[in-house]
């Protein structure tokens, strides 16, 4: 049912109306989509690019990298180091703006065993899509997952990885990234980026100006999907243990 709700929201022209509806219909979404309860140090949506520019091997490198990161002792220790001793993660697969999105659902990480449960799920998550690069709708979906997770937290983050700039819906109205950023600001969500510039050397600049947003947000930039495994490990460490520095771009060499 959450897919139907999001599709309804993102087909409305004005974001002010969207945010009003989110507030007015929160009871409905909470009743159908909430999966968590209690205090969390972080709720994090890992939004993974599955558009047509991402090959099957590149998709597996992304998912394998996330799984490996969540098996890393340093990452697990970071997840358990906050005052609530737990974080929550949700994998969101996104591609063409007109295609359905896929969510893993929320996973609580509060032990080595629960981190392994999440990692095993990610490694076996083989659903893919294709088409264009629907960044705006992906971010809007991620915001709604965070807003109606059921968790109590001061830190709501979307981690967007991708290898291209936004492409738009074929039909009107064309919900774009700038519209999703208005939703993000209202919801108090931080967006961090992992740009993969295998096809566009200037992609990190685009991610820094258009994608990453919110207090302490940042962008990491890598040359190929082969670099994804180490990049996502470092990125998760920074997101779980946030720095207070201003927005910056980091390139792995």
Image (cartoon, rainbow, N blue to C red):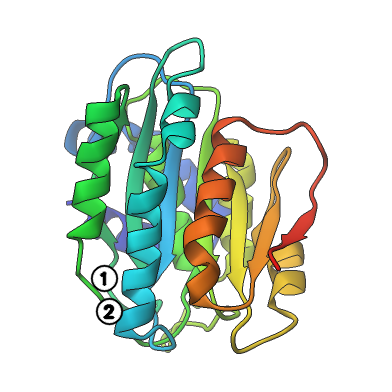
Q: Nearer the viewer, residue 10 or 197?
A: 197
Q: Earlier in the sequence, mark 1 or mark 2?
A: 1
* Element marked by disc 2: loop
Q: Secondary structure at mark 1?
A: loop
Query: Which mark, by number, is residue 100?
Result: 1
For this view, does 91 lie left or right of residue 253?
left
> Quarter-wise, where is residue 129 in the image?
bottom left
Residue displayed at 61% across by 58% down: 193
Question: Which sits in the foreground, 125 or 148?
Answer: 125
Q: Going by the picture, which residue comes out furthest to the top?
A: 83
Mark drawn on residue 74? none
Query: Total label count?
Result: 2
Marks 1/2 in contact by CB < 8 Å: the verdict is: yes
| The C terminus lies in quadrant | bottom right
The residue under the point 82% across, 42% down is 246
Q: Hey, which quadrant is residue 108 in on the image?
A: top left
Query: Above or below — where is 26 with respect to 182?
Result: above
Residue 99 image position (x, y, % from top left)? 30, 77
């Amino acid at each position: 049912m959450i897919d139907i709700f999001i599709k309804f929201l993102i087909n409305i022209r004005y974001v002010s109306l969207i945010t009003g509806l989110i507030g007015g219909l929160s009871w409905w979404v909470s009743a159908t989509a909430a999966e968590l309860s209690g205090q969390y140090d972080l709720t994090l949506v890992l939004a993974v690019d599955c558009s047509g520019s991402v090959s099957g091997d590149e998709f597996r490198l992304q998912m394998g990298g996330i799984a490996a990161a969540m098996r890393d002792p340093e990452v697990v220790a970071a997840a358990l180091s906050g005052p609530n001793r737990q974080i929550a993660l949700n994998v969101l697969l996104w591609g063409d703006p007109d295609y359905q999105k896929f969510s893993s659902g929320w996973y609580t990480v509060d032990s080595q065993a629960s981190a392994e449960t999440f990692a095993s799920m990610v490694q076996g998550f083989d659903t893919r899509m294709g088409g264009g690069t629907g960044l705006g709708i992906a971010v809007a979906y991620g915001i709604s997952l965070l807003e109606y997770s059921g968790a109590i937290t001061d830190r709501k983050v979307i981690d967007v990885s991708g290898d291209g700039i936004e492409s738009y819906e074929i039909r009107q109205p064309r919900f774009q990234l700038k519209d999703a950023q208005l939703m993000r600001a209202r919801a108090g969500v931080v967006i961090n980026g992992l740009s993969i510039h295998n096809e566009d050397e200037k992609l990190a600049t685009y991610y820094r100006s258009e994608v990453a947003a919110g207090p302490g947000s940042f962008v990491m930039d890598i040359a190929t999907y082969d670099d994804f495994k180490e990049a996502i490990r470092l990125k998760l460490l920074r997101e779980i243990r946030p720095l207070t520095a201003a927005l910056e771009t980091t390139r792995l060499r």
